[in-house]
Amino acid sequence: RGKTKRLDVLPLVMDVRYPSPGSGIANECFSPATQRLSCELVLALALVHHLVFHQNMTLEKVVRALEVFVKRWLVVEFISKDDPYVRNDWSPERHPWYRLEEFQRVLEARFARVERLPSDVPTRTLFLCEGPRAGRHHDATSGAER
């Protein structure tokens, strides 16, 4: 549909755990993915539980992996342990800290405003985050916070 309507959308596939580094002298050939792909809005649906249960990432690392691409807004979905898909197939007991309240706490530590929104599925929650927090600027070139 995007092609037929000529929408300004660029679909990309990238592992957020390993964003492409810059290349060339002073990254002049290609800047790092965290710079090239930073966006006004980052949409992360049905992703968090994959990174936690299959890639063994903490909630803090998941949020940081997304945050480096956010210029203004992040919409992220949290799928609870009670979701039949997670409960039956993913051994959620391995990560007792994987809880909605903990995810919201991590988001609130990194973003200026976090709003919890309902989903059409009761075991799923959407978060609208505006960020980053005042005084926290992520230097995408070095990966350091200033």
Image (spheres, grey):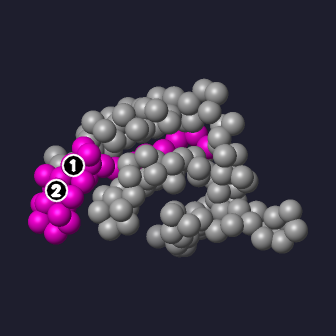
| Visible residue check, residue 25 | yes
Amino acid marked by disc 1: Pro
Labels 1 & 2 near each other (Cβ < 8 A)? yes
From what the image shows, is residue 61 above or below residue 115? below
Identify the residue at horizontal 26%, vertical 46% (top origin).
97
Identify the residue at horizontal 38%, vertical 48% (top origin).
59
The residue carrying mark 1 is 96
The residue carrying mark 2 is 93
Is the residue marked by circle 1 packed among few (<14), some (14-19), or many (20+) residues within 10 Å? few
Q: Choose top left, top right, bottom left or bottom right for residue 92.
A: bottom left
Decide which of 2, 23 is in the foreground and name it.
Answer: 23
| Visible residue check, residue 124 | no
Amino acid marked by disc 2: Glu
Q: Which residues are magenta?
A: 71-99
Residue 126 falls left or right of residue 68: left
Identify the residue at horizontal 50%, vertical 34% (top origin).
111
Q: Position of residue 61 (x, y in %)?
A: 46, 51
